[in-house]
Image (spheres, rainbow, N blue to C red):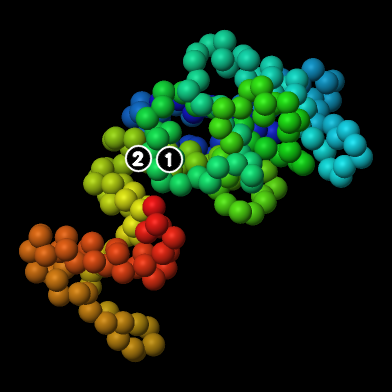
Amino acid sequence: MRIDIITVLPELVLPFTQESILGRAQKKGLVEIHVHNLRDYSTNRWRRVDDYPFGGFAGMVMQCEPIDRCISQLKSERHYDEIIFTSPDGEQFDQPMANELSLKENIIILCGHYKGIDYRVREQLITKEVSIGDYVLTGGELAAAVMTDAIVRIIPGAIGDEQSALSDSFQDNLLAAPVYSRPKEYVGVNGESWGSVPEILLSGHEAKIKEWELAQSMERTKRLRPDLLKK
């Protein structure tokens, strides 16, 4: 799989793509992540990629030409399954979308910035607009990082224990069950007991543990995210 990220702030995105699961997945040859500086595609002597909006609106708007030049260059080299624009008014990013995108061969993520991008880019080049939440960020770089992490970590081989990814929250529209580790009983630094690990998890009875896990997932989803149950 190949992911191309287009941004005006590559120094914000690059370090994230080189560490942890993303870094290891690239070293294993499971994914290629390329970060492109949009300013490299500007024909302006000052490498500007934005200008004032028509109509007297506030803010600055990313222009068509540098985006068109960058995406056209990439498309001349390979086919892209999706060209994604990070936008607060896009489709809500969730685990099913991450699963779907992880099966693609090549995708582009265009990071929005300033007041937004010239709407003609969205009409002519973008195949999918995606939001990571109902709030506005300074730019789409954080959204691109979130999406890239969620997509890559579920590619087979990206993490050591593939079953771990499959049991994450939202994979089946349920929140994950509680997890515990050693010690069995813990006393906090203030001297108060934090309780014990549920006995069922110490029983070694796989079927009963699975039943407990499902019941806990259902209970937590119903209490914390009842909207997921409607899906």
Give left or right: position of 194 versus 184. right
Q: Is residue 40 left or right of residue 166?
A: right
- Residue 19 visible at all: no
Asked whether disc 2 touches disc 1, contact meaning CB atoms under 8 Å apart, the reply is yes
Question: Circle 2 sits in a helix, a strand or a loop, which is it?
Answer: loop
Q: Nearer the viewer, residue 113 or 190?
A: 113
Q: Position of residue 162 (x, y in %)?
A: 26, 43
Categorize mark 2 by other alpha carbons within 10 Å: few (<14), some (14-19), many (20+): many
- Residue 58, image quadrant: top right
> Which image quadrant: the N terminus?
top left
Q: Which residue is mark 1?
A: 98
- What distance separates the C-alpha of mark 2 from that of mark 1? 8 Å
Instruction: Please say if 112 is above or below 164.
Output: above
Q: Given the image, on which type of amino acid does mark 2 rest?
A: Ile
Instruction: Judge whether 230 appears above or below 192 on screen.
Output: above
Q: Amino acid at mark 1?
A: Ala
List the residue tagged with mark 2: 154
Q: Is residue 139 above or below residue 228?
A: above
